[in-house]
Image (cartoon, grey):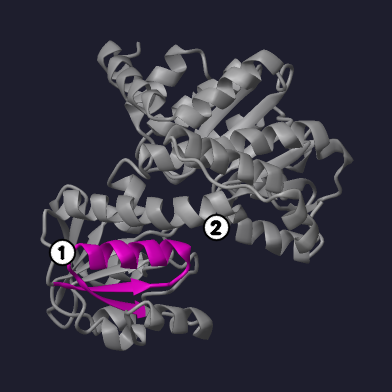
């Protein structure tokens, strides 16, 4: 039987998120009247915490039959799962799921034969482009939440294998400018600090990757008083980091003096075993990328002596005698060791998702397979709704100005 205390805690978390997500609330009221998802099944793979649950309930209020699973075994919050299940939402996920349990959860979600998918990282999508293609027979379209998943979509599209229209929600301006930068920046350091209880001011922080997530992590580290070094492979981003006032160095050099290292690249093998052997004694390692492949965790477990020294903190003693510390098993630190992005940030992101799903439900059957941007009107609608929640007014172009600029 479900533990009632677990349901109560989860319900409280969802209520707190609801109180601080006015944009999703307004969209829910509109969609509840319109019922655009009536008769539609939506499969969702996403980080299962309170903001997500609030969003899922909004989709249900709009008529959808929603089935949910996690997109990371360590980001699922069991109390939130229990609260969603108490609301009648089918959820197949638990914190600390084994690889088999994780993939079983994805499969159970797809077995509903969905019309729409909301993916975070691309695992649901990958299954529908492999041996379980038949479960996608009724799919109208996909919305993808994060950089890693969008990268996988573009790869499928380039090779001609993408079977469905897919909206790259992560590429909307109201997503990457705020969720990726301010959301990842704040939540990453929140998780690192609560997990280690260590001072950041006066330390050296190495940020691997200066995309929008890396920008946010670097910006917040500087705000906390750290000396920030950026490692990059893109020369243009390296120039930007330099002009933003950060030190730019190769990772192998910077790791020798870094007290904290945060990866935010979306790529694999960013921090190799050889890099770790060159690390400063006591280095704290954290990953802010979607999958646990940015730091060579396997080599650490196979070649170093290790033990847990604090909840969420593993100590690895290397063959050269140095010690490094890995947070959250090398998984997405802000969700595996924290509550993820601030509520107001996810209010923006889930507003984009809700309106993009609605757009796909209406237009998806007429679209060819491919990766599509979030329609500009949706992006700007969410921006205006955000400003309205803060009582901020802006100017508008006059008809003469629009003609001058060649706008409709």
User: Closer to the camera: disc 2 or disc 1?
Assistant: 1
Residue corresponding to mark 1:
200
Q: Residue at x 43, y 72 (%)?
A: 210
Residue 293 location, quadrant: bottom left
Q: Residue at x 82, y 61 (%)?
A: 160
Q: Measured along the vertical axis of the image, is residue 353 above or below residue 196?
A: above
Q: Nearer the viewer, residue 83 or 322?
A: 83
Magenta residues, start to end? 203-230
Residue corresponding to mark 2:
147
Say which element carries label 2: helix
Disc tally is: 2
**Is residue 212 rendered magenta in the image?**
yes
Q: Measured along the vertical axis of the image, is residue 17 above or below residue 279?
A: above
Q: Measured along the vertical axis of the image, is residue 68 above or below residue 260?
A: above
Residue 35 picture location, percent across and down: 70, 17
Distance from the alpha carbon under mark 2 to that under mark 1: 27 Å
Mark 2 or mark 1: which comes first in sequence?
2
**Is residue 263 rendered magenta in the image?**
no
Q: Residue at x 33, y 16 (%)?
A: 7
- 92 to the left or right of 360: left
Q: Nearer the viewer, residue 268 or 120?
A: 120
Neighbour tally class for label 1: few under 14, some 14-19, many 20 plus, Cα within 10 Å: many
Q: Nearer the viewer, residue 6 or 98?
A: 6
Say which element carries label 1: loop
Q: Nearer the viewer, residue 123 or 103?
A: 123
Res. 75 visible in picture: yes
């Amino acid at each position: 039987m479900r533990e009632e205390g677990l349901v109560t805690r989860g319900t409280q978390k969802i209520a707190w998120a609801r109180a601080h997500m006015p944009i999703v609330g307004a969209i829910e009221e509109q969609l509840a009247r319109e019922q655009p998802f009536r008769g539609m099944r939506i499969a969702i793979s996403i980080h299962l915490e309170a903001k997500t649950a609030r969003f899922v309930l909004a989709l249900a209020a709009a008529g959808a039959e929603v089935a949910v699973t996690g997109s990371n075994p360590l980001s699922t919050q069991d109390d939130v799962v229990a609260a969603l299940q108490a609301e009648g939402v089918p959820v197949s996920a638990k914190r600390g799921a084994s690889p088999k349990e994780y993939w079983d959860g994805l499969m159970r979600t797809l077995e509903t034969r969905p019309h729409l998918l909301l993916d975070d990282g691309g695992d649901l999508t990958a299954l529908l482009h492999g041996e379980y293609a038949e479960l996608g027979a009724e799919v109208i379209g996909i919305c993808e939440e994060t950089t890693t998943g969008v990268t996988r979509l573009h790869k499928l599209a380039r090779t001609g294998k993408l079977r469905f229209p897919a909206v790259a929600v992560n590429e909307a301006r109201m997503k990457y400018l705020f969720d990726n930068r301010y959301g990842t920046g704040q939540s990453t350091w929140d998780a690192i600090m609560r997990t280690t209880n260590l001072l950041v001011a006066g330390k050296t922080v190495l940020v691997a990757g200066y995309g929008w997530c890396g920008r946010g992590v670097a910006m917040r580290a500087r705000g906390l008083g750290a000396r920030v070094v950026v490692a990059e492979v893109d020369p243009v981003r390296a120039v930007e980091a330099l002009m933003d006032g950060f030190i730019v160095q190769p990772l192998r050099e910077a790791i020798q003096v870094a007290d904290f290292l945060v990866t935010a690249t979306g790529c694999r093998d960013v921090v190799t075993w050889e890099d770790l052997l060159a690390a400063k004694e006591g280095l704290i390692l954290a990953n802010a990328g979607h999958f646990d492949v940015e730091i060579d965790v396997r080599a650490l477990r196979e070649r170093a002596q290790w033990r847990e020294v604090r909840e969420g903190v593993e100590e690895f003693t290397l063959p050269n005698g140095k010690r490094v510390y890995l947070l959250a098993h090398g998984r997405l630190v802000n969700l595996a060791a924290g509550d993820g992005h601030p509520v107001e940030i996810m209010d923006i992101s889930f507003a984009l998702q809700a309106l993009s799903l609605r757009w796909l439900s209406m237009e998806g059957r007429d679209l060819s397979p491919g990766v599509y941007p979030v329609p500009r009107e949706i992006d700007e609608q969410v921006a205006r709704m955000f400003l309205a929640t803060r009582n901020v007014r802006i100017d508008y172009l006059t008809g003469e100005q629009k003609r001058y600029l060649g706008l409709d």
